[in-house]
Image (cartoon, rainbow, N blue to C red):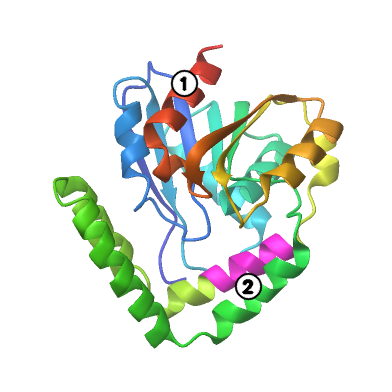
Amino acid sequence: MPEELQLRIHGDASLPTLIYLPGLHGDWTIIGGFRRALAGRARFVEFTYPRTLDWSLDDYAAAIESALEKNGITTGWLLGESYGSQIVWPLIARGKFPAQGMILAGGFVKHPLHGAIRLMEILIGTIPLAIVVWVLFSWTKIARYRYRRSPQALAAIDEFVSRRTELDRRAAQHRLHLIAENDPREAARKTTVPIFCLTGWLDPIVPWPLVRSWVKKNCPALRAYKIIGRADHNVLGTASKASAEQILEWVSK
């Protein structure tokens, strides 16, 4: 194992607890804006996954349960971002962590475009690392200009880029394989834990009309499905303040 599951806690234990499970990138490097929008109003627990090539989704869930227990976190709201939503389902099904609710941010039950996930799995495994580095370099130049007045954001960009290694790419490919193989629809139908969904209007990665249609028909525990305009798949990052306000409203109720 190249590294361990990592956990960080921000905020006082007296505040509502949000437990963030990141997306395919697997870490907390691009959640800073959302974290700052919650400051003083929620306890934010965030994870970075190990770059494992053999864990199952159940292994992820068991490791997260153990880490929460070791840190004295006995309940809270599960916030699953994209791939992280796939870990939420086994966490709920195992019944060992008494979640107060689940929030799927750009998340889903079974991915509605199974063939596209299989294709992405193949492509990520074949794209030369040099191309990945070039794309990251181009993105970094734009991001540095956009966040030039925010030292915290600039530091997060550096951390994000430094983590994108060959092993990181292979770990992302493995996570895509887990998505393609996973089918938690039966668990979603049966759960009694309140479900809330949040997505950006422009999301070609997880098409929200298909996800919303399915959960409205099949999930009695669904409480709300919110679409934020001018946001994309990374809704917590591209609409940090709006996402924080909406989630805090749900949590307060």
Name the residue: 45% across, 77% down: 167
Q: In screen coordinates, is 214 left or right of 174?
A: right
Name the residue: 47% across, 71% down: 1
Number of numbered markers: 2
Residue that lies at the very extreme toward the top in this rendered image: 253
Q: In screen coordinates, is 230 left or right of 120?
A: left
**Is 13 rendered above or below residue 188?**
above
Q: Which residue is mark 2?
A: 120
Q: Is residue 59 visible?
A: yes
Mark 1 lies on a secondary structure that is helix
Q: Does the magenta stretch mainly form a helix, a strand or a loop?
A: helix
Which of 237/3 is in front? 237
Which of 198/92 is in front? 198
Q: Quadrant of residue 190?
A: top right
**Is 129 rendered above or below residue 184?**
below
Name the residue: 41% across, 84% down: 131
Tell me residue 84's x, y (percent): 57, 49
Q: Quadrant of residue 27?
A: bottom left
Of the 4 image quadrants, the one containing the C terminus is top right
Which of 251/227 is in front? 227
Tell me residue 229's x, y (percent): 51, 36
Tell me residue 59's x, y (percent): 62, 56
Write down the region rendered in magenta: 172-180
Q: Is residue 9 visible?
A: no
The residue type indicated by label 2 comes to Met
Per the model, the C-alpha gap separating discs 2 and 1 is 34 Å
Q: Which residue is mark 1?
A: 248
Sort mark 1 into few (<14), some (14-19) or many (20+) by Cα contacts within 10 Å.
Answer: some
The residue type indicated by label 1 comes to Leu
Tell me residue 185's x, y (percent): 82, 45
Sort mark 2 into few (<14), some (14-19) or many (20+) by Cα contacts within 10 Å.
Answer: some
